[in-house]
Image (cartoon, rainbow, N blue to C red):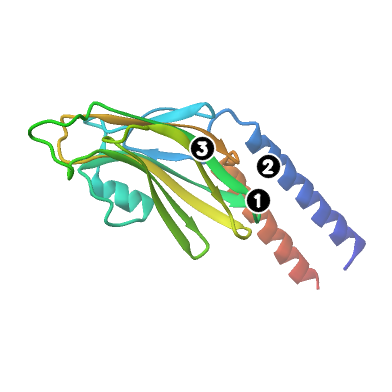
Amino acid sequence: MKVNDTKKEINVKRIAMIVLFMGLNTGAMASILPMGSYIGQTVDGITLTTNRPDAASNQEVENFLGISSLGGVEGSAIKGAIYLEKDQVFSFDWDFSTSWSVGSYKSADYVDFSFVNLNFQSTDVFSTLALASDTTKNGKFEWTATQAGLLNFGIGVMDVGSINDDSSLVISNINPVPLPAAAWLFMSALVGFAGFRRKANS
């Protein structure tokens, strides 16, 4: 390998690190993609609701997150991707609220809920954060990576049965902080370009 090639690779790495730090200092969760009915989209949090008319259909939420058999009538969700090292913890705070309450026309089959869905390597994890009928409706979700890799996550809230009742889910303090999508794309391009240059010069 030539000295000039080594210097170019070092410069590529420096540029990539600059992009990373730019991403970490951004005020908006640029890599978080929301859909449906939502309020705000900053590092301080985002509120997902089942409010009409912006809430998405069950099928739209499933297609957005790439999952099936979610259940429900309508809802909202976010998705994103974060690279994790082995034993690194992915976490976020959540607070679920609802106007749903037990009534003569409601049954256990019609309980609004909030959820998180994870896809990591060949592992799929689906977990209910809270049901409208639960006593505890807030907490901290944590998941630990068993190896290094890219974690794709989805978080949402669903209206089940009656569309007259609204529910909402506040998500905050996502950790690690997701990088802007543009930073990931730019870094991927730089890595690919460096590989191409190395191969061309060999």
User: Could you classify mark 3 by the number of other residues whose Cα lies within 10 Å: few (under 14), some (14-19), or many (20 or more)?
Assistant: some
Query: Who comes first in sequence, dot 1 or dot 2?
Result: 2
Work out how far the residue at label 3 is from the one at label 2, CA to CA, in angstroms.
21 Å
The quadrant where residue 97 appears: top left
Lateral position of residue 127 relative to residue 27, left or right: left
- Residue 102 vs 89, above or below: the answer is above
- The answer to whether the residues at label 3 and label 1 have Cβ atoms under 8 Å apart is no
Residue lying farthest to the left in this orientation: 104
Query: Who comes first in sequence, dot 3 or dot 2?
Result: 2
Q: Amino acid at mark 1?
A: Met
Lateral position of residue 41 relative to residue 180, left or right: left
Lateral position of residue 185 relative to residue 36, left or right: right
Residue picked out by circle 1: 187
Lateral position of residue 113 relative to residue 141, left or right: left
**Image quadrant occupied by the C terminus:** bottom right
Please state which of residues 37 and 84 is positioned toward the viewer in this rendering: 84
Residue picked out by circle 2: 20
- Residue 183 vs 190, above or below: the answer is above
The quadrant where residue 135 appears: top left
Pinpoint residue 134: horizontal percent, then vertical percent. 31, 36
Q: Is residue 87 visible?
A: yes
Query: Who comes first in sequence, dot 3 or dot 1?
Result: 3
Residue picked out by circle 3: 92
Secondary structure category for the residue under label 2: helix
Secondary structure category for the residue under label 1: helix
Residue beneath the point at 68% across and 54% down: 190
